[in-house]
Amino acid sequence: MLVMIVIIVLTSIIAAFVLSMKVETQLAQVSDYDSQLEWMGRSGVELARYALTMKCAGQEGVDSLNQFWAGGATPCTNDNPPFSLKDYPLGNGTISITITDMERKWDINNLADPQSPKLDVLQKLVMKAGATDPTQASTIVDSILDWRSPNSDPHFNGAKSEYYSRLDPPYYCKCGPIDDLSELLLIKGVTPEIYWGVNSTNHPVSAYQQVGPGGFDHTPRRTKSRFVNEQNQDTNVIGLADLLSPMGGKLNINTASAAALAMLPGIDETTAARIIQERVGPDGVDGTEDDTPFHNVGEINSGLPGGGPPGAGPGAGAPPGGVQGAPAAGVQAAGLAAYCDVRSYVFEVQVDAEISGVHRTFTGIVSRNPQNPNQITCVRFHWN
């Protein structure tokens, strides 16, 4: 009996040692791969920069979802050999690259620019995200402007450091550009349900969200794993995170969602759906060979060059690009052009690198030179 007990004890010790050595070996292996994975991530960003220069014939001046960088059907060029952005072999492993243009969403810094704020769009965005109460919507808009503005005086319903310093924990108003969209969760009036959308799940409650004196209740209540907005429980399915980006430029009408397009002045949800219908082509799917991207903003405006006559649209005898319901004649070309474009200039590149079962995800931000579209520079790089 004593011998059996000794054998069992020794067996347990050996098993624990083997398991510990296996874990240590895996950790050492991952550590050995750190440098390789990082350079694979950086190489993925370089490959993305190359992919962004590959354009279809006749589409050199536009960025759209049927192009190679966005996962479109073909590289659209005879000058470069075809390759895949998924499971691309590199060194001892593979990388998969996903490129997303930032201009498919509204640039919050553009909308809240202290010099030329686009309050009409910002107001519509806030209301779309669920702030249907006029006082709450005004508070959010004014507070976003104050967060962005270097001026020390707050707007009527806004907030500066005097307000935020009374919160727990206290912090200062940034008074500068928004670098990360989650900064909105710091701003007076922005609740998690307005930021994420009431139907979005599994998002942690920000540690910064507090109940400030004189402000709206920032503390969300959970019901069935959802943030609940009691006044707009059924209709608030889109949050600010779905419509806004922390960088970019004008909204790209070739890549934006219908919800984002509906925020354009003079464009409602029905017209936004028609804009999508026009650009996706006969098959009704974005990113396929029959897509017909817009080549200038005027093509979506029935009263501008390239559009159709007022009230006309696709299939109604209008020239290509005329969208029924778009602002009619009398709207100047600079009107919509001040808000949207057919190009994108800032792209987020996600690189998933893998070596022998070890995975790591890297994110890079690349920027295109407006004067030289083929000059694309990496401005940020980090791993998640």
Image: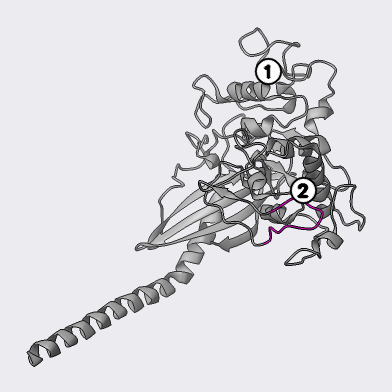
Give the residue drawn at x 68%, y 18%.
323
Q: Nearer the viewer, residue 121 or 33?
A: 121
Residue corresponding to mark 2: 109
Return the disc, 1 or 2, that comes first in the chain's sequence: 2
Residue corresponding to mark 1: 323
Residue 151 at x, y percent in the picture: 91, 56
Q: Nearer the viewer, residue 7 or 56?
A: 7
Q: Which residues are magenta?
A: 208-218
Residue 225 at x, y percent in the picture: 51, 48
Viewed as shown, does residue 331 lie left or right of 217?
right
Give the residue drawn at x 60%, y 42%.
198
Identity of the amino acid at label 2?
Asn
Identity of the amino acid at label 1?
Val
Residue 302 at x, y percent in the picture: 74, 16
Which quarter of the figure has residue 267?
A: top right
Please name the colour scheme applied to the rendered image. Answer: one colour
